[in-house]
Image: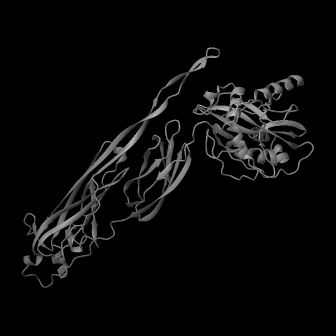
Amino acid sequence: MRKTLASLCLILAIVFCFSVPAFAVGDGNLDGGGGGMGSGTSTNVWFGDDGVRVTVVKAETHSPVTTPIDLTNKSPTNVRLHFGKVSKLSYTNGMGLTPSKSAYLFYKPSQALPRIVSSNGRNNIAAIKSYFTDEQVIRSIANLTGMNYEVLIGGDYKLLLEPLAIYKFEGVMVATTATEAALYDEQVNGLLRRRMVSLSHKNLPLAMFLEVSDLGYSAWNGSKTKAASNADIKSSLGLGIVRFTEQPEPPLVSTYDYEYRVNTEVITSVMVSGGQSDPDNPTNVSFYIDGRTYNVGNVYYPEGDSQLAWVKWKTPDTEQDMVINVSVRGPGGTNKTTINCKIVDLDKNPPPNPVADDRNDRFRQEPVPQREEKTRADWSIWYPRWQEYWVRHGNSEDGYWWCDHGWWEFDLNRYYATFSANMNITCDSKNPTASGRVMKSGYGINQKVSSSVSTNQSSAVSKPQNAVSYFPEFNYKTYWRLLERMGSGQFEFQKNHYSTYKNHTHFTPIWMPNGAYEVNTWVIDSWTPVGMLSANLTDSLIIRGSLWDDWHVAPLNRNKEDIYGL
């Protein structure tokens, strides 16, 4: 048996011998840590023997497509306990840990492996990356695993690397990967950790871990020098990945700060870019708002372009400053950003109570301000579709097979929203001397606002929700009235508690000079993925004379407020 194993090792060593020059192939996604080894005993000791288990994995499905192979510089023919050739992916997917009855099979490459499992903190990750992205090594691995080299590096496959160690445990020579060591420790009720923690739970699992998430495993952000738990080893440690396509950078996120009104349905958006996002490599965005998480999935866009991602939500009913945290997870990793929001209440500064002897001799008519106005919004969404491209591989000796080497193409769907609004002010119905659109100062006016939004993507638009009126006597600032929502896109003045009849009215000052009395109303809070739609409206009545012109005799006990409130 030993002669057979020796012959097999010799043959495999010859397979690894190539005279071609070495070139870098692939991109290594791995990092490492570790630390001191501590002291061992004669029955529980590691002599420094290490290696790597290599599995070819289908990138799209995260499934192994070859039987794993173990590479080592040593000749561990004395291994008495091992668990066969099982990858970390198979264990993650539920395969149990089972001792193998067969002799331990290994391959000893002529191009020696670098140190894999380090001690005393001497991390060797740069040499490991260089080794497993070397063209000569990749060609050898392709040959040993039965893969065609060109197919292997074509972008559809990845190499899963797992550090392994050969050591004596309770007097028996054992060969395990980091994941198998954690699973075995659970089977022996923690005895392996108690006996060999520096190897089994520190230097072996920390020999390799991911820099960025891949194949369903997260990048490791924990300690790189302390012993890990079995759970952490199984979920995130003891693995590296070699990719054969250019790995995109983490997605870029562009954000904007917002000012919102209280108790309003709004839309918050971010722009995502960087690399390409498609169904094979999707991007997902999470918004963390006021204690809730809003997830936006399948944000797609082609290379060199970008895509909006947005969420519709309702603001709180009190003024406050808010911070929205945004997390974007894409093919190249994760990026995070924050959006600052100011939530304001516009119903806190209505005009004061007018009285009959008010004066403003210095009044000068100001022009209506040019408030922000946006009556159309346009945005777009990328939709991917697969373009098939079948290629024949192989030769007459080995046979032929067909592979779909297609790609994702993108269609751009365009969306829009248009906003319309109008306002109409009229003399108050309790004004006894109004004539059409002519009235005397000191009496009230009514207002109605109608607004609507038209769109071909209603889920991405909120209807207009607020309207604010400004008045010439306050130079269109200082004081204003937040209008009351009377239905979908309909507004009018709130009930005026200074009015005798509690009408929806605004009283003009009795000192207002003759001429046009022009009211300015800003209709706002129709939100889209590209911002707020709004309209800046005006309407006017004619003032001619004052309320005093209608009163020539009055009872002595009638106060001015009663007269003004009629």
- Mark yes or no: residue 94 visible: no
Compared with residue 375, is residue 494 higher up or lower down, i.e. above or below?
below
Compared with residue 181, is residue 311 higher up or lower down, i.e. above or below?
below
Quarter of the view holding residue 88: top right
Quarter of the view holding residue 44: top right
Where is residue 501 drawn, in percent x and y?
20, 68
From the viewer's side, name the closer residue of 563 and 56: 56
Say which quadrant the C terminus sits in.
bottom left
Compared with residue 16, is residue 483 higher up or lower down, i.e. above or below?
below
Q: Is residue 44 left or right of residue 510?
A: right
Tell me what residue is drawn at x 34 percent, y 69 percent. Answer: 348
In this picture the colour scheme is one colour
Where is residue 46 drawn, in percent x and y?
86, 43
From the viewer's side, name the closer residue of 15 and 514: 15
Where is residue 261 drawn, in percent x and y?
37, 61
The residue lying furthest to the right in this view is 42
Q: Is residue 355 left or right of residue 133?
A: left
Tell me what residue is drawn at x 69 percent, y 24 percent. Answer: 146
- Mark yes or no: residue 72 visible: yes
Say which quadrant the N terminus sits in.
top right
